[in-house]
């Protein structure tokens, strides 16, 4: 299986790379900057690990990466849209309406929401060529509508928008005879001990990585109309 992972240089992304390689898959790791750990993995795994620069906030970068990858791969089976940012602290310093930092809000959407949209716009033709296509958009419990809490306002908004996009493309694919078997998930990976998750961490990213691979490998029966799930495959409340 050929799997492309965005934000593959650290956090959940690099765990998915390590697990995928261990499970015998061919991995296309994409990143803004590779970092030592990924470069070491390349030394060990050679052709099984394809490395590619791709900034998901920059459409030219996504298009250029897709061009280079298309020259080497006839098809991609799985795309994991993992790259994201959390640019806020837990509680907004000030009034999050009138004092909103617009630049941070825009940047959050550029990466967390428009990033996956750009990536799938370019890479979907390669997924269409797979016999077992699968899309995993890494989302968050922050995408739930709740009656309390005003924290992580830009991040949560970006993830709920990502979920809506994911559900809409899922509904489109399901309505096409030749595309309805493409599997698509929006997965909350849990509160992980990563740079992003440090404020609220409960688990190591190694835990959800294994669960996400079980889902990718179709080892869990998940036939939900709204595939917003946790890393164990359980339905998340919307
Ligand atoms: N951590 C948690 O508790 C938690 C909870 C719920 C959901 N999530 C979700 O889980 C996923 C992974 O999060 P994480 O905790 O592993 O975060 P992380 O450790 O902060 O890693 C984020 C990754 O995204 C990459 N990235 C950021 N902007 C990018 C861009 N413009 N183009 C390409 N790559 C970019 C980063 O690369 P650089 O090194 O270049 O910055 C890094 O590789 C995210 O989708 C996140 O929203 C995390």
Image (spheres, rainbow, N blue to C red):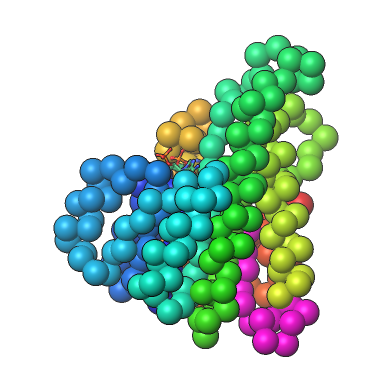
Q: Is residue 216 magenta?
A: no
Q: Quadrant of residue 1?
A: bottom left
Relative to 169, residue 163 above or below = above
How many numbered callouts? 0
Look at the image and give the residue range highlighted in magenta.
Answer: 174-187
| 185 falls in the magenta region | yes
Residue 121 percent across, percent down from the top left: 61, 62
Given residues 31 and 218, the one toward you in this image is 31
83 and 91: which is toward the camera: 83
| Residue at the (47%, 46%) spot, across then down | 55
**Residue 227 percent coordinates (x, y):** 68, 64
Residue 199 drawn at (x, y percent): 51, 28
The structure residue drawn at horizontal position 32% and vertical position 58%, both measured from the top left corner, is 51
Name, please, the residue furthest toward the right: 147
In the rendered structure, the answer to whether residue 71 lies left or right of residue 174 reads left
Does the image show residue 134? yes
- Residue at the location (74% across, 29% down)? 149
Residue at (21, 64) in percent of width and height: 45
Residue 127 quadrant? bottom right
Instruction: Find residue 125 and report its image quarter.
Output: bottom right
> Residue furthest toward the top?
94
Q: Nearer the viewer, residue 2 or 59?
A: 59
- Camera sees residue 189: no
- Is 183 placed left or right of 31 in the picture? right
Q: x, y percentage for residue 162?
A: 68, 51
**Extreme left residue here?**
43
Q: Is residue 187 left or right of residue 148?
A: left
């Amino acid at each position: 299986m050929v799997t492309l992972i965005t934000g593959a240089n650290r956090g959940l992304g690099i765990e998915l790379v390590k697990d995928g390689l261990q499970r015998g898959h061919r991995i296309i790791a994409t990143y803004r900057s590779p970092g030592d750990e990924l470069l070491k993995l390349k030394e060990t795994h050679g052709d099984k690990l394809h490395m590619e620069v791709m900034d998901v906030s920059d459409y030219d970068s996504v298009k250029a990466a897709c061009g280079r990858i298309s020259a080497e791969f006839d098809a991609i089976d799985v795309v994991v849209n993992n790259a994201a940012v959390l640019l806020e602290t837990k509680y907004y310093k000030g009034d999050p309406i009138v004092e909103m930092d617009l630049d941070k809000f825009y940047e959050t959407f550029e990466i967390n929401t428009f990033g996956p949209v750009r990536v799938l716009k370019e890479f979907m033709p390669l997924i269409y060529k797979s016999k077992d296509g699968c899309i995993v958009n890494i989302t968050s419990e922050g995408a739930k509508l709740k009656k309390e809490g005003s924290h992580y306002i830009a991040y949560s908004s970006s993830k709920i928008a990502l979920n809506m996009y994911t559900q809409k493309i899922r509904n489109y694919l399901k309505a096409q005879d030749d595309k309805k078997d493409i599997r698509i998930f929006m997965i909350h990976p849990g509160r992980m001990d990563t740079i992003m998750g440090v404020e609220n961490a409960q688990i190591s990213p190694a835990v959800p990585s294994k669960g996400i691979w079980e889902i990718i490998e179709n080892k869990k029966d998940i036939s939900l109309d709204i595939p917003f799930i946790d890393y164990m495959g359980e339905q998340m409340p919307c």
